[in-house]
Image: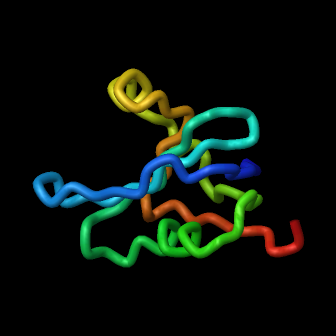
């Protein structure tokens, strides 16, 4: 699944829940969250933080990124990408 990230909406963390996230807007105006464990490697978040926008990427396992009903209603997410799902950033676009 290819996405074009156009904006980083929120770059945050929760010490209580031990989670970090990067909430982004896509070119189709959908919201996508990349998340992982606080203190974990979180390669997806680290990679995206240093990209010039817009950035095109491929998600390796979109079936593993379906947001829960709570994530959809609470955060308006169309995709919820955990740190164990690989992404490929297209450097040519």
Left-right relation of 53 to 67 = right
User: Quadrant where the C terminus lies?
Assistant: bottom right
At a point 63% along the width and 33% down the height, the residue shown is 30
Q: Image height check: is 41 above or below 16? A: below
| Residue lying at the far right of the rendered structure | 92
The residue sitting at 28% across, 58% down in the picture is 13
- The correct choice, above or below, for 89 with respect to 4 in the image is below
Way the structure is coloured: rainbow
Residue 17 in percent (x, y) is at 16, 52
Q: In screen coordinates, is 37 left or right of 56? A: left
Q: Is residue 52 left or right of residue 32?
A: right
Give the image quarter of residue 69: top left
Q: Position of residue 9 (x, y in %)?
A: 51, 47
- Residue 26 location, x and y as percent? 68, 43
Total label count?
0
Query: Which of 89/28 is in front?
Result: 28
Picture coordinates of residue 5, whole percent (x, y): 68, 52
Whether residue 73 is situated above or below residue 26 in the rendered picture: above
- Relative depth, front residue between 61 and 16: 16
Q: Residue, x 54% and y 69% (percent of image)?
A: 49
User: Which one is nearer the viewer's eye here, 45 or 52?
Assistant: 52
Residue appearing at x 43%, y 63% in the figure: 83
Q: Residue furthest left?
A: 16
């Amino acid at each position: 699944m290819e996405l074009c990230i156009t904006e980083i909406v929120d770059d945050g963390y929760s010490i209580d829940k031990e989670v970090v996230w990067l909430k982004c807007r896509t070119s189709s105006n959908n919201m996508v969250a990349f998340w992982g464990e606080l203190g974990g490697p979180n390669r997806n978040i680290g990679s995206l933080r240093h990209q010039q926008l817009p950035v095109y990427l491929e998600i390796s396992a979109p079936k593993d990124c379906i947001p829960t009903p709570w994530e959809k209603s609470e955060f308006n997410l169309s995709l919820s990408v955990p740190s164990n799902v690989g992404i490929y950033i297209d450097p040519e676009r």
